[in-house]
């Protein structure tokens, strides 16, 4: 029995083979890199969940379709299914491994947004320095990284209140931009997530630590890996 799966491209001989999951998008860190401008940096993922293979859109701008229908949630896959990323050409699901891969599975959903494993001793420290700004400290082993940020800090600070938990886009827009967020396009949030991921990528980590799916976002860390400090709303020290 094969231990890998296949996605067949629009040209003869173009095949993407994968084991644990297949990340699709324009960013170089994806397994399947598509260079069409309409494709998002982290566009979609094919992954093993519980008892089978599924595809889900990662909150891309132009969506992912399965057999001609745009995805609104995670959907199971079968050989012969046809996928399109944004307005790109068709990719056909080929061989699918009949048993879960031995590594990198989406156990508890925690690692499904990550292309590369995170260091076991990774620690994210968020220090609020005033209204709407703060310092982001990322450390593991002998590595120490620091960056000051505005809205990117606010995004991380809110997601870090419940690491691993999904937060809806509507809630994030409200937190970040107040009532104005109701009138803003979803691209504003997508752009902010892209720039916040760059904080981690600049440290040599996987930007997928901030995971995006249709209508929701989360921080892929355990509570023990996150600490909050400094002055926050109400003037209280945390």
Image (tube, rainbow, N blue to C red):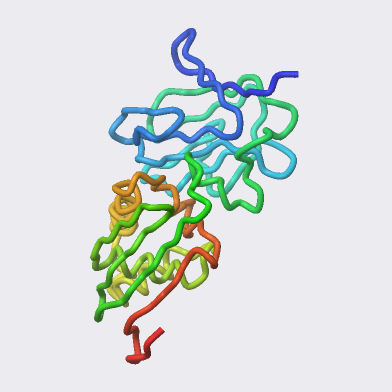
Which residue is more in the foreground, 16 or 83?
16
* Quadrant that contains the N terminus: top right
Q: Nearest the camera: 48 or 87?
A: 48
Q: How many marks?
A: 0
Residue at 35% over, 44% down: 204
Figure check: 112 above or below 187 = above
Residue 164 appears left or right of 49 = left
- Name which residue lies at 38% across and 32% down: 87
Residue 85, position as x, y percentages in the image = 43, 33
Which of the pair 223/81 is nearer the observer?
223
Which of the 4 image quarters holds residue 172?
bottom left
Q: Quadrant of residue 101?
A: top right
Residue ranking furthest to the top: 12
* Between 91 and 41, the one nearer to me in the picture: 41
Quarter of the rendering containing residue 231: bottom left
User: Does residue 16 lie above or below 224 as drawn?
Assistant: above
- State the residue at coordinates (34%, 83%): 232
User: Residue 43: x percent and y percent?
Assistant: 42, 40
Single out the residue that lies furthest toward the front.
Answer: 142
Q: Residue 84 location, x and y as percent?
A: 46, 30
Indicate the quadrant containing the C terminus: top left, top right, bottom left or bottom right.
bottom left
Establish if 160 lies above or below 29. below
**Residue 183: image x %, image y %?**
30, 67
- Residue depicted at x 28% and y 61%: 146
């Amino acid at each position: 029995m094969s231990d890998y799966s296949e996605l067949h491209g629009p040209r003869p001989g173009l095949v993407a083979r994968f084991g644990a999951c297949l990340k699709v998008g324009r960013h170089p860190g994806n397994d399947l890199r598509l260079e069409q401008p309409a494709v998002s940096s982290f566009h979609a993922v094919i992954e093993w969940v519980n008892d089978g293979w599924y595809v889900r859109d990662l909150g891309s701008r132009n969506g992912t379709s399965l057999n001609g229908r745009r995805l609104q949630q995670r959907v199971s896959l079968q050989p012969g299914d046809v996928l399109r990323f944004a307005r790109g050409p068709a990719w056909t699901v080929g061989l699918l491994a009949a048993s879960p891969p031995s590594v990198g599975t989406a156990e508890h959903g925690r690692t499904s947004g990550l292309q590369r494993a995170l260091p076991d001793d990774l620690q994210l420290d968020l220090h609020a320095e005033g209204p709407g700004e703060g310092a982001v400290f990322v450390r593991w082993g002998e590595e120490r990284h620091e960056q000051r940020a505005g809205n990117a800090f606010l995004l991380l600070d809110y997601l870090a209140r419940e690491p691993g938990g999904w937060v809806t886009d509507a809630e994030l827009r409200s937190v970040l931009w107040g009532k104005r967020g109701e009138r803003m396009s979803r691209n504003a949030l997508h752009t902010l997530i892209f720039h916040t991921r760059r904080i981690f990528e600049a440290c040599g980590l996987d930007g997928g630590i901030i995971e995006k799916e249709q209508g929701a976002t989360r921080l892929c860390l355990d509570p023990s890996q996150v600490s909050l400090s400094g002055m926050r709303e109400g003037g209280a020290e945390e």
